[in-house]
């Protein structure tokens, strides 16, 4: 049984339908990547899993339990944390205060605490008293990831974490993923960068216009097949 899965997930914003029967599965200890162009439905999928968008109860399952209709705080309490697109740090709080916010929704014992987050991203210890939004984009992204880890999640959702960052910074952030997974979190990565997604994922799903158009193992997917699924053209 998958740790996390969606079954015929349909999502709407008012009268606008954004997702059309999306099925994905994440196994324990696995990293999956969701790729697709702007408007493909990737962020809507993350919002649906995290409880920001409420769905049918059986449209999202976590550890066998139906969670599709639960609100976001209940999703966090069960062990699913999201690193949102755009980081969404609290501008009035310091780096350390932003990190500590992550424990409020799920204060459980586990690998992640301030010390282990600072070991993962040493620059944050140096900047811990700085306002979170006074850091560089890459450092802010590290804070957002660390904040999510502070809840010791079983599933970490990462929505467009490389967006707007320099390649060298993206490399440093993704270098932390093996340690995050070794500490017990299964990971869902939403990426527009196909190359980066293929490097980090055990399996890949491609979305276009609210539907899954391709799934497979990175090493078995050709560039032509991915291109067709991504853009809808041969």
Image (cartoon, grey):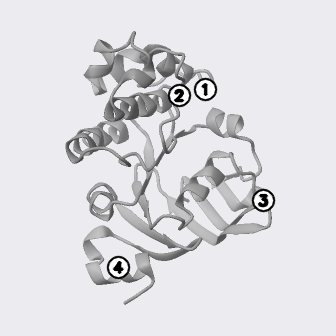
Q: Write the residue at 62% across / 46% down.
A: 50
158 versus 129 height, above or below? below
Element under disc 3: loop
Task: Determine the residue positioned at 50% across, 20% down.
Answer: 98
Q: Mark 2 = which residue?
A: 151
Query: How far, Cα to Cα, is label 1 from label 3?
Result: 24 Å
Task: Please say if the residues under marks 2 and 4 sit with CB atoms less than 8 Å apart.
Answer: no
> Which percent across, then down, holds residue 221?
30, 77
Which mark lies nearer to you, 4 or 3?
4
Whether tag 1 and tag 2 are in contact, CB under 8 A, the answer is: yes
In the depicted structure, whether residue 231 falls above or below residue 92: below
Find out whether the residues at labels 1 and 4 contact each other: C-beta distance under 8 Å.
Answer: no
Position of the C terminus by quadrant:
bottom left
Q: Position of residue 76 (x, y in %)?
A: 62, 35
Q: Whole-Å distance between the Cαs marked 1 and 2? A: 5 Å
Query: Which residue bears the numbered disc 3?
Result: 56
């Amino acid at each position: 049984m998958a740790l996390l899965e969606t079954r015929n997930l349909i999502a709407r914003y008012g009268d606008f339908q954004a997702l059309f029967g999306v099925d994905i599965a994440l196994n324990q200890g696995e990293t999956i990547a969701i790729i697709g162009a702007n408007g493909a439905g990737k962020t809507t999928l993350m919002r649906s899993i995290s409880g920001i968008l409420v769905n049918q109860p059986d449209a999202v399952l976590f550890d066998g339990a139906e969670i599709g209709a639960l609100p976001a705080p209940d999703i966090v309490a069960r062990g699913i944390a999201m690193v949102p697109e755009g980081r969404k740090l609290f501008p009035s709080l310091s780096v350390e205060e932003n990190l500590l916010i992550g424990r409020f929704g799920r204060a459980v014992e586990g690998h992640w605490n301030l010390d282990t987050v600072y070991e993962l991203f040493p620059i944050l210890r140096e900047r811990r008293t700085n306002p979170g939004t006074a850091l560089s984009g890459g450092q802010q992204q590290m804070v957002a990831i660390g904040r999510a880890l502070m809840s010791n999640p079983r599933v970490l959702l990462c929505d467009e974490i490389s967006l707007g960052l320099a390649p060298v910074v993206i490399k440093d952030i993704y270098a932390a993923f093996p340690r995050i997974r070794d500490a017990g979190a299964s990971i869902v990565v939403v990426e527009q960068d196909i190359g980066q997604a293929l490097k980090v994922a055990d399996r890949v799903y491609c979305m276009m216009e609210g539907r899954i158009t391709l799934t497979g193992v990175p090493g078995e997917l050709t560039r032509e097949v991915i291109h067709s699924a991504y853009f809808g053209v041969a």
